[in-house]
Image (spheres, helix red, strand yellow):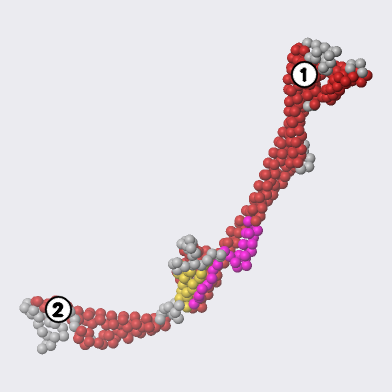
Amino acid sequence: MLRPHTDGNASSSDQISISTFLRKWYYFAITIPLCLGLGVAHYFLVTPTYVVSARILIQERGRPLTPQEGNSLDQNFLPTHAEILSSPTVIGRAIPSIPNAKVDSPDKSPIDQVLERLEVRPLAGTNVISITYTDEDPAWAIDGLTNIIDSYRNYLTEREQSGHQETIVLLDKRAEKLREEIAGLQAEYQQVRSQSPLLGNDLDAASVQRNKLMRVGEELVRTQSQRIVLENQLETLIAMRKEAGEPNIHLVANPALPDQSSSQRKIVELLARLNAEGLLTGAHLQTDLDTLLAAEVEYAELRKHHGEKHPNVVGVMNRIETIEKRLDDVASSATELVRQETNSLRRRETQLNSLYQDEFLEAKKVDQFLVQQQQKQDEIDLVKAAHDTIVMQLNELRLADQAVSEGRSSVLVSVLDGPVLTDELLWPQPKPLFGICVLAGLASGFCMVFASEKLKQINRAPKSSGTPHQMPLEFGSTT
């Protein structure tokens, strides 16, 4: 029978004992088979889903896989390629080869359908990307992921080739423009050469002109020096003639002759020195002075031994007089001789100065042509160097483009593993499905037991409302 409860135990009426669930086992016998039946129906009716995964290695050609000392992996390299792989451009190129993506859907485009099934995840600290793709057909899933990887690889190749082709076109145009510029500069250079007064090698011709100017300059300086020396000596001669005061000189110490003038003697010696130095043309006065000196010595010796009347003494005296006469003539005209030679040097100096100016102008003209030619040649060399650099870049780009065409792109994409099925079946798998069904059956049984007990409490509540002191009874209690 039911056991009454006091007000202090009124809250216990909301509790259901375990024995109640055990007594009403038949609820679970209904819910669990029912949920299992629904699970079986779901298993056979739902479309299965399969997952295919692959890992690809993305590496810049020529760069080591592991970072060397002082170098680190580019943190943006792998995320960038992950975004490229999952981009609509790459997926759109693979759509025609993905069977499931060809099904028309009013809600989503084929690209959106593939992107929902695709997951691209870079592996931190590596150059590896993990890719997963889901599909209802395992063969379609493998083919779809394979086509996506191939589309990504082809996109990189075509992108690199496109960049190469664009650069090659630009460099070709630049090289053609430089060749035209070289041709124009060479025409200008030929025009400068045709107007140049030089023949043969420019540097040699200029060197000849400079040497010629240098020789004229040296001759001009030497003539100026000679003129200055003669002008100074002319002033000395004039002073010496004024000091001598005699038209003739007597150089021999002859007692029969008047006393010799030291100033006249100096004049003859000065003329002899100028003659010896090549500053004064004419007879060799120094030879005459030496002959006169020897005759004087001989005269003195003969006179000492034979007297003045001896024929030998008379002959030597006649020879001395002949030399003295010749020297007297020279001494008397010394001033005029020096003046004439000075004027001759002055005229030669004027001629040399004019010749030097002409040669200087010619050398300057040659130098100007040399500078113009050198400037044109330098411009040609600079443009040629730029042209050669561009040609070298063109050759490198063509080789790189050929390498890309043959499958050797700058970015190497290698499939490490896959595409392979990660599991035989992603969903529905029997064990998880039926386990969920059993749990759902248990949960449903518990809910039904709880609901039935609550209904009993609600139904009994009006009967006990007429007895104010009688409290609700605990379910499951007996006497």
Tell me the SS state at disc 1: helix
Q: Nearer the viewer, residue 23 or 270?
A: 270
Is residue 400 shown in magenta? Answer: yes
Amino acid type of the residue that numbered disc 1 sits on in the rendered structure: Lys
Image coordinates of residue 93 in percent, x first then y, are: 54, 66
Residue 463 lies left or right of residue 343; in this view the side is left
| Disc marking residue 32 | none
Tell me if I can see residue 125 in this picture.
yes
Q: Residue at point 73% right, 28% down? A: 221
| Disc marking residue 12 | 2
Q: Which residue is mark 1?
A: 266
Which of disc 1 and disc 2 is earlier in sequence? 2
Query: Can you name the residue that lies furthest to the left here?
Result: 469
Q: How many marks?
A: 2
Res. 186 image quadrant = top right
Q: Residue at point 76% right, 21% down? A: 230
Q: Is residue 458 above or below residue 352?
A: below
Q: If the image is split into quadrants, where does the N terminus sit? A: bottom left
Q: Which residues are magenta?
A: 393-420
Image coordinates of residue 429 in percent, x first then y, are: 40, 81
Q: Is residue 69 above or below residue 449?
A: above
Q: Residue at point 35% right, 84% down? A: 36
Residue 81 lies left or right of residue 274; in this view the side is left
Few, some or many residues within 10 Å of mark 2 (<14, 14–19, 20+)? few
